[in-house]
Image (spheres, rainbow, N blue to C red):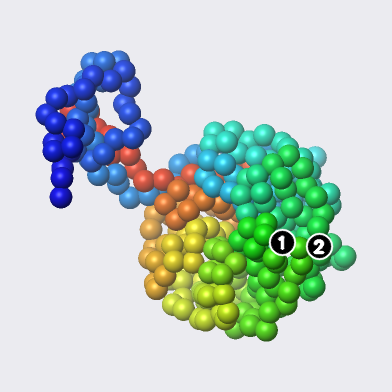
Amino acid sequence: MADYKDIIGLDIEAKSANPTDTVTGEIWFNTATGKLSYKKADGANTWTTGGDLNVGRRLHGGAGTQTAALMFGGIGVTPPHAGISQALTESYNGSSWTETGDLNSGGYQMANYGTQTAAGSVGRNSGPLQQVHEQFNGSSWTETTDTNDNRQYSKGAGTQTAALVFGGESETELYNGSSWTELSANINVVRLWAAGCGESTAALFFGGSPNGSASSATCESWNGTAWTEVNDMGTARFFLSGTGSQTAALAINGQSTKTTQQFNGTSWTEVNDQSLDMNQGAGSGTQTAALLFGSQIPGNTDKAEEWNPVDGTQTVDDA
């Protein structure tokens, strides 16, 4: 296998700042600091501070990536929004949040799917809004075909033309871009306040509460046809957040825990805890580049944290 010397050569380049696209073993001279720098392997992922939300909320929806995220709905936590169902939507660019087009109807505990510019919100907390389905185009929300069942406590996965909603107290439903179909295969263990991630043909559903008080570590995998129980999480919890894919998922925070765990398609591994207690938040991104935002915890309701590997860039002084 070729190494850095074989690919680049022995010359040391002068750069005005530390580059962001380095490879392990690369060496350069930083003209701004007057120091020799090099790249070693990145360290394990840790949580660091992201940009604050404009309005702190809990039990909201989320979609997108770490640097292009969307937050919508929820319950306001601090005055003047405290205890009020929200229609507010905010967009994240990797450093700050900007308010954009509101949902047509406010609410919380919705399922969600999609990207920052092509997202979906499914269901609400109570009443006739439990079946409502809205889609976002990057600037505004449009109501589209309602689900067949009430979708309180459900989770979502997929895209605007191929979405899956599952869990809570309802059947699994599949959306094809125009209509919803109830599927005969359903979750094996009914749970509230769980987490989910993935695509319409390959999803994961984990954690939650079977009765509104006890915590569950149960994890189930969807293969496009059926739900199958797989290895449990190491820490049982509800009000957790999840992101990633069916075979590379991230379980974040939860009631009375700041634990972060990674799923590799077979088993869960505990990794670095979150810095802040942020249960009842929402997540976006991948297993290795995630974002968690919003919370019910006083002082953290408007916070966001980013999950990234520790940069391996070093200067000679750091050696």
Q: In the rendered view, would you say 117 is above or below 178? A: above
Q: Quadrant of the C terminus?
A: top left
Task: Decide which of 226, 192 is in the foreground and name it.
Answer: 226
Residue under label 2, please give it. 145
Q: In the rendered view, would you say 39 is above or below 259? A: above
Q: Which circle, 1 or 2, is nearer the viewer?
A: 1
Residue 177's disc number: 1
Residue 133 appears at what percent x and percent y?
78, 59
Q: Which residue: 45% across, 48% down? A: 289
Question: How dense is the environment of label 2, judged by Cα within 10 Å: few (below 14), some, or many (20 and up)?
Answer: some
Task: Decide which of 46, 95 is in the foreground and name it.
Answer: 95
Snapshot quadrant of residue 254: bottom right
Q: Could you tell me the amino acid type at mark 1?
A: Gly
Residue 53 appears at what percent x and percent y?
64, 39
Q: Which residue: 37% across, 49% down? A: 45
The kind of secondary structure element at disc 1 is loop
Q: Could you tell me the amino acid type at mark 2?
A: Thr
In the image, farthest residue toward the right:
128
Residue 281 shows up from this direction: no
Q: Which residue: 50% across, 58% down? A: 244
313 on left or right of 171: left
Who comes first in sequence, dot 1 or dot 2? 2
The kind of secondary structure element at disc 2 is loop
Q: Which residue: 52% across, 51% down? A: 285
Q: In the rendered view, would you say 9 is above or below 233? A: above
Residue 292 appears at what percent x and percent y?
55, 49
- Alpha carbon of mark 1 to alpha carbon of mark 2: how far? 9 Å
